[in-house]
Structures are given as C-alpha cells and as structure tokens.
Image: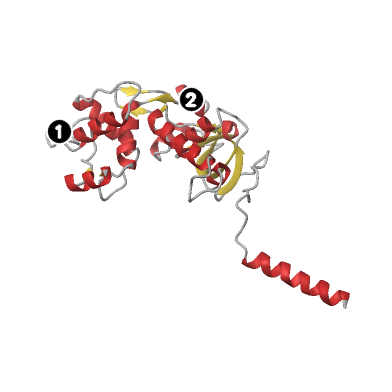
Amino acid sequence: MQKFWLFCLTLAVLGLSIFLPPSADARISPCPSRLPQLRTTLECQIAIADLHPTQPVVGKYQVQYQVAVLKVIDRGESSEYATVEDYVNQRKVPVVLGPGNQFYMVDSHHTMSSIWEYYQGNPNIRVNIEIIQDWRNKPDFWSAMKTNNYTYLGTPGNTISPEDLPHNLGELKNDPYRAAVGMALNWGFFERPKGEKIFFYQFKLADCLKEFGLTLPEEINRSHVYQTLAMIHDPEYSYGNSSVCNIPRPQELSLEGIVKKLQ
C-alpha cells in the first residue's frame, strides 16, 4: 500500500511539472570560458561589463525613461513583469564574437544602458546574449562589421575610428538628438519609411534634423521631443538630397492621430 501511495504522489508531481509554466528564474547557461569555433548561433550568458558597444552614443533621456520603467517594475506596479530580474531575463542581445574573444553588441544599446544605469554600473549583472557571428579570426573584422551594418561610427565628415568606441556601456556619451528622435518614435508620433530596411534610421534622422537647423540642449525634456516632432513633419525640409541626410522622409501620422496619442 505504501508503494502505491508513493507511486500516486510521483504521478501527481510529474503532472504538475507538465502543466505548470516554466520558472521565470530559468536562465540561459553561462558562456563557456573557452568557446570552440562556432558554425551556428549560440545563446549564453555573460556579465554586462563584457558587452562592447559598437556605437559611440545613446540618447540619455531615452535611457532614463527606461530606467523609470524599471523602477515601476521594482515597486511591483507592472502588470507585465513580476521583478526587474524577469525583465532582464527576457532580454537577449545579439553580438558578434570578435578578436580577443570580445562580445560586440549589434543592437539593444539603449535597453542594456538602462539596465546598467538601474544597477548603478554593477559590472556583474548577468545578461543573455546570442552570438550571431564568430569572427574571432576574421582579418578584416571592422570592415566586415561596417559592411554588415553591425556598427555605427557616425556620418560622413563626422566619424570616429573603431579604436575610439566605448569599452563598456558606462562610457557611452549622450546624443540629445538621438534621444528626441527615439522617444518620438517610441511614443508612436511617426513611423519608419515603408519598404527596404534602413539601418540606424534613428541616428540618420537625428543627423538630418541637425542639418536642418534643429538645436537642442544637452539635457532635454518632453517639450524638446515635441519640438523635434514638429521639424520631422515640417514639409519645408527635404530628405535624401545630401551626404548627411540621405534617407527618405519618415511616415507621418495625421494631426488627429498625434493628438489622440497625446491624450
């Protein structure tokens, strides 16, 4: 009889394990200390300090906005995430594995910067990555990075060399124009052009606005985002006719649509 009840208990536990959702604390395994040559993508986990940016700047206003969202989660006021750790665990950064076994980010600079800021630069916070290319032995590494749109080093006449890129997320500088464009896009006040994907569109749109004469302070607020939006939609300015502004015009929303989003 004792064996029978033990058998029933085992079935009950197995049944629960089948129907319960996976734990939110489930983690991707840490990256091996010695990675073999990769022929396919690999998902693993590293310390946030080991992420190497591939662009010189982020929009700090946008980063601080995302930090505020993390604080809402921390207070238990989010309906989507139970904890900040849940939020972090559900993010995955695409990276290129480069010379010296360095992990070069190709996206998610703002998201990872907000996590870095929230944890006050704690270098040991673990983040999930997906290695999309293993280019450790590629002789023309940075040339390939640029060709494949894995890095943004600036616009014609205003570029930096790869050696001048930040070594970690804490060294990224502020670009208020990129912040204003990013927030206007995130708030749904305009859309990217339809059709072929344009890499680094928000950076390039910010460069267009600077060429048009937009002037923003280093520290911006919501009113500067609206100022940026007005110039984005101003028909006086033409896109795609200079070496700096060589992108198509953003897809506009109707005035009624923008007002609705502001309400």
Could you say where residue 174 lies in the image, as x and y percent from the top left?
39, 24
Could you say where residue 213 lies in the image, as x and y percent from the top left?
20, 24
Residue found at x 32% / y 28%: 221
Q: Quadrant of the C terminus?
A: top left
Left or right: 6, with 50 as reference point: right
Residue found at x 31% / y 41%: 185
Closer to the eye: label 1 or 2: 1
Q: Is residue 38 visible?
A: no
Image-quadrant location for residue 4: bottom right
Q: Circle 1: is it few (<14), some (14-19), or many (20+) Cα within 10 Å?
A: few
State how many labels appear.
Answer: 2
Q: Which residue is mark 2?
A: 166
- Disc 1 to disc 2, C-alpha distance: 33 Å
Residue lying farthest to the right in this orientation:
2
Q: Circle 2: is it few (<14), some (14-19), or many (20+) Cα within 10 Å?
A: some
Residue placed most toward the observer, 118 or 215: 118
What's the mark number on residue 237?
Answer: 1
Q: Say which amino acid is labelled 2.
A: Pro
